[in-house]
Image (tube, rainbow, N blue to C red):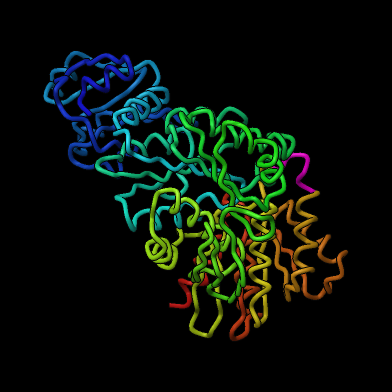
Amino acid sequence: MKIKDIIKATKGKLITGNEENDCEGFSKDTRIIKEGDTYIGIKGEKFDGNDLWKKAFEKGASTVIIQEVNILEEEIKKYNNKNIIVVENTLKAISDIAKYKRNLCKKEFQLIGITGSVGKTSTKDIVANVISQKYKTLKTQGNNNNNIGLPFTIFNLKEEQVAVIEMGMNHLGEISELTKIAKPTISVITNVGTSHIGYLGSRENILKAKLEILEGMEKKILVINNDNDLLHDCYLKNKEENIEIYTYGIENKSDTMAEDIILKENYSEFICKIKGEKFKINVPVGGIHFVYNALCAVTVGNLLDLNIEQIKKGIETFELTKKRMDIKDLKNGVKIINDSYNANFESMQASLKYLSGFKNRKIAVLGDMFELGDFSEEFHKKVGKEVKENNIDILICSGKLAKYIVQSAEKSGMKKENIYYFENKVEIIDFIKNIWKENDVYLFKASNGMKFFELAETLLAEDK
């Protein structure tokens, strides 16, 4: 895009600069800005990025987009070889620019929008790797799936034929805004669980929020996990409507299904059935939830006309975003499963089930799950029951809400001498060093704000 495109999209004012100059390499962080980048100042809770516009120029930016900044005449003269655009609101501006750029995409361009209570990022990773076997593909980096992260992903579009975009939300109306920017050609809903139920009040409202993804679609093509109860009901109610729905599953009859599933510690394999064809797939990550992710990738790949070999290669070579089921081996045979980026009941349940599949001593290091509101006690107690039902050998907890996990695990029948609680999570490291044995398997799982990933990283660092 050029400066004149930015002005047209944002209705901004060019204070100094040339409308014909190119505008690319968008950044909101002066620490990582590159020569020729366009810097956008974002006003946050702790500091105002608009105040750093001069620093952005010093770091090599050619353009800044800012709001509510008093620019002096001498500053205009000093930076007369740069581009300064002033807008009313930079948050609205990044949305407007992203919409403008998305509309520049060719008609054959495909955008896959992915949302769901659990597994958005891992599904995005595997879908993108499959699609990239045939098409030049852009994907959301990390979990930049909100009203800032999604537009910045769109800004990175260049010559790609497909984009795989993750969409997250905490409240009703948020995915509605994101989908109107991204305009998906295919949408995916991985599941409807309990994440953010403290804000939304019920799983039915969570489903309503996820279905907002359809609002930005010209032709409504939806891929869903047919084994999720609410999505299955949604499919039954809407399959005769103007929504083209494609299903994947293991239990309920679906368009894409897995048979003869074999789950191992570090991988899984199954026979995939789609359109009357059957073929074997190996998934390089353990856990039944990654079988579902693979089925989703098969479904999307089929919709984009990939052949079986391309789909298989994409699944068998994909890599996860870090901190999400990141498995490392220590020198003494101990395994560290760092799945600590985020947590809700469904992801806790899946991780504990995966841990239960290991033959050696199994230790779950669990912390608080956030954003559950009035449901906090209930769902933490449910996690405690899952710990016992999955035959976890040792439970280690820290966090105010994690006390309910401890209470429930003991009430469910787990031996008291195998349950440990620490007020300070730092004490966990010393405790683990005292109890661990060769070939132990440790799962670290909590909401990101608990920073349990630091525990896993400490153990890994000390093992070097």
Quarter of the image where the C terminus is located: bottom left
* Above or below, comparing residue 236 to residue 316 in the picture: above
> What is the x, y in percent for residue 453?
54, 60
Is residue 391 in sight in this rendering?
Answer: yes
Count up the numbered dots: 0
Please report the residue visible at 27 percent of the width from the left and 18 percent of the height from the top.
7
* Above or below, comparing residue 205 to residue 319 in the picture: above
Q: Nearer the viewer, residue 285 or 232?
A: 232
> What is the x, y in percent for residue 90?
38, 24
Q: Which residues are magenta?
A: 372-377
Q: Quadrant of residue 197?
A: top right
> What is the x, y in percent for residue 97?
34, 26
Is residue 270 one of those drawn in magenta?
no
> What is the x, y in percent for residue 391?
76, 74
Q: Quadrant of residue 129?
A: bottom left
Is residue 17 in sight in this rendering?
Answer: no
The answer to whether residue 398 is left or right of residue 292 is right
